[in-house]
Image: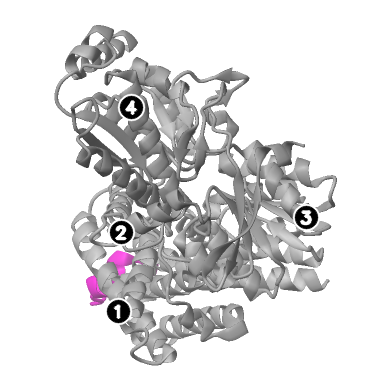
Amino acid sequence: MHDLIKQLLIGLSIGSTYALIALGYTMVYGVLRLINFAHGDVYMVGAVVGYYIAEKLIGHVPPWLVLLAVFAGAVVACCILGYLIELLAYRPLRKQPRLTLLITAIGVSLLLENLFQLPFIFGPTPRSYPPELREAFGHYFAPVTLGLSLVLMAILTWMVMKTKTGLALRAVSFRFDAAQLMGINTNRIISLTFMFGSGLAAVAGVLDAMRYDVRPLMGVMPGLKAFIAAVLGGIGNIPGALIGGLLIGVIETLLRGIILPQQYTSYTDAAAFMILIVILLVKPSGLLGRATQEKV
Amino acid sequence: MRLIHAAALALTLCAAGIGCKKDVGASSSTGDIVIGEFASMTGGTASFGTSSHNGLLLAIDQANNAGGVLGRKIKLVTADDRSDVNEAVTAVQKLINSDGAVAIIGEVASKRSLAGGAICQRYKIPMLSPASTNPAVTVEDGKVKPWVFRICFTDDFQGSADGKFAGDKGWKRVAVLTDVDEDYSKGLSKFFKLAFAPHGEIIADESYRNSDRDFQSQLTRIAEKHPDAIYIPGYYTELKLIATQAASIGLKVPLFGGDGWDSPETVASDATQGDFYSDHYSGDDPAPRVQEFIKTFQARFGEKPGAMAVLGYDAGEVLIDAIKRAGKADPAAIRDALAATKDYPGVSGSITIDANHNARKSLVMLEIKDHAARLVKTYTPDEVEK
């Protein structure tokens, strides 16, 4: 029993970063019906920016101040990156078929991954944050990660449900053209959506970088899993992304730590994805998604 | 289509002066002798590549300063494979086809040596691995690969020595954590389990993937079984994460592993203090040849050489010696000379290439203490095979 609780905690803490990334996927899908495949790489950029800030500051100022600067710097940098990606890569193509956008997204993803493998930007060698940052959390790293994700999600939900910008965002997501006719500045809303999503990915990137390390391809697997989390929760649905993310984290941890016999633990990802396929077969619109009919 | 491909390939090969037997001697009897090196200069195991490269560089510079080989200078061309097996294949192809290497040195990681070795076999260019320990690198399905050699021991020996060490330590309950994506790790794990069986019990046999970065599930499961020690036959990048995470979940038993741990990063980490690993050489060795090498290396690169640097240096020296004995920079002649290497006095010990193209050498067990790797014990092949 004790073991189960430990594994559950591990799963929730892994899942909370999936959830943070999944929120970005789901919000962008909500307004643009676009799967932003570059999102996992924005998470990586957040980790890299945080790494450079930490390296510059550590030893000069107390660890908690470094932490604050790392988070703030990574979030700001990723907000700008998200804004630029939308402005330069997606906006010019908004009137094009959705497939064009999707392929552009994959292009942006490859661009970021390869750009950051260049030695003068970051290089392919994994690097670690100064251990002082991780130690500042003591034994509470996992609960803090989970708590941070929940708080950020709560703030996001509040913004979407209670503020004027949130209302506009929901309107755009409900019907793009009509929202535009009602005088909503859709470009501004879309930019904001990308910035929010990228900021959350930056937080996830820094958290994961602190407990693991930083590498240019670190966004590939978490990005994929977060995308699946978003689909699982019902893509376009904010609480759905959180639940989906946590669920994937927990499923994979339980599979690896308890359910699968030890000689098969390396098949965890395969087993986890299989379970997801089954869930989606039963409930194609995701756990919290509503079945909608595509208008022809 | 296939025919066109084959024709195009043949043309390229002839143009590069390789593959067409007649051209080899003609194109390589003047100018610099080109030695190709493929190494993980960057990526997940960057410290393997950079260390072995520095060692090799030192060997080649020393040879060139002493007047070169056969009256010619040696030119080292290094191709970075970014710690990726596909890149390793491309790198070896480039070294052979466009740089015209007469011999290849590389890699440290067995998976990449296996991939690069296949290319060298195809083009009939001798390859010498400084540090790959998986048996299949030189011998696959009972057949010796004619063009591939190594100057280090193999995992049947290393795994057995590690098992014997665990027995000597008096550990009765050992957990194993294997990287199933690496031939090196799988091989070492297999031989360790066989050798440890008479001494105690393998209480957990867990695994992870190369891309994994969270090992807490496996470690939690291992912790429940109260092991005396955990055997981790993986590479240093993952080891560092595993050690840190083990400490964070309160698992405070010694970890031990193989030469894949050899990196300044392992020794520097706070989480690995008090852990053990087997390696090819120890800086504590008082032999003059070793201490002299350490001094030269340190003067040139500003750091103490690890085993990978020593093996890189020895690989360079053994290859240069073979070219001298071959009397010409011809791949086939170098191959024959390499196979005939006998009692070469390397820094990592005396090197004799046996019938299986391996070197029979002793192994050292090191303990990480106060951020340094200290010699605990030496295991000779005779002692382990007994």
Query: Mark 2, residues whose alpha carbon is within 10 Å: few (<14), some, or many (≥20)?
Result: few
Q: Is residue B96 left or right of residue B111?
A: left
Give the magenta-colored segment's residue range.
A174-189
On the image, the x and y values in percent for residue B319 come to 37, 31
- The one of A218 and A199 positioned closer to us in this rendering: A218
Is B191 rendered above or below residue A284?
Answer: above
Rounded to the nearest angstrom, the CA distance separating label 4 from label 3 is: 41 Å
Q: Residue drawn 62% across and 39% down?
A: B155
Tell me if I can see residue B43 in this picture.
Answer: no
At label 2, the amino acid type is Phe
Q: Which mark is residue B168?
A: 3
Disc 3 sits on a residue from what chain? B
- Is label 4 or label 2 in front? 2
Q: Is residue B173 left or right of residue A250?
A: right
Q: Residue drawn 71% across and 42% down?
A: B160
Is B248 rendered above or below residue B302?
Answer: below
